[in-house]
Image (spheres, rainbow, N blue to C red):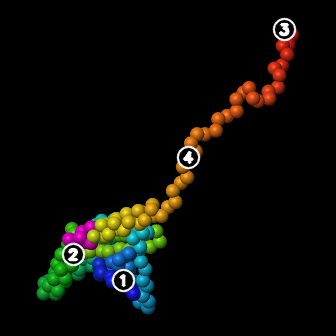
Amino acid sequence: MASSRKYLGAEVGYGMRLRVYLRNDAIEVEEASINEIERRRVYFDDILLLTYHRERGKTALIIMGIILVMLGLTMAVELSSRTPEAAIGSGFWFIILFIIFTVRLTLGVDVITVYGRRTMARLKFFWRKGRARRIYQELAQKIEAHQVRAAKAQAAAAPKPPPPPAEPPLPPSLGSMDLPPPPPPGPA
């Protein structure tokens, strides 16, 4: 019987869509690309690092910046040709894109990353920052509880080392050893 899973978030990228789920013993990542679906898990036992940070998204900002410059130049050409009616369309899209650019630059994207020994999972939150913090705290608590339980079970199952010897053996005394006679005194 498959364990239940809880939806945590999704990310849409270039030609793929990631969905991240929380399971009883792992974080599951479902990656749907153009022609296949791949599912991988990051087990709580294997998690090495859990991070929470904010990034701006250079690619999106660069693309929006280029489009803003092109719209600005188009608007300037239309205004200089003494047809301000034609500049209204460019101006409208310039303002909309400028607002989106400013919001993206100001707020950034909150990212939760889970690094395992063999795999990793990433969750990105553009708008819902509070939900990102709640998910991060929930993951941190579940991972810590699972790893503490696993460490206790491993310590209980480990064999105990043998006790040290009561007293280490002493070296043999010099009187009982066969030593060669001392050399005779030489001429002075």
State the CA–CA distance, disc 3 to disc 2: 101 Å
- Is residue 98 shown above or below 182? below
Kindly identify which residue carries mark 2: 127
Kindly identify which residue carries mark 4: 164
Number of numbered discs visible in the structure rendering: 4
Q: Mark 4 falls on what kind of element?
A: loop
3 or 1: tag closer to the N-terminus: 1
Residue 56: percent from the left, percent from the top?
Answer: 28, 69
Q: Quadrant of residue 13?
A: bottom left
Residue 62: percent from the left, percent from the top?
Answer: 31, 73
Residue extending farthest to the left is: 85
State the CA–CA distance, disc 4 to disc 1: 47 Å
4 or 3: tag closer to the N-terminus: 4
Residue 4: percent from the left, percent from the top?
Answer: 33, 83
Q: Is 132 a magenta residue? A: yes
| Disc marking residue 188 | 3
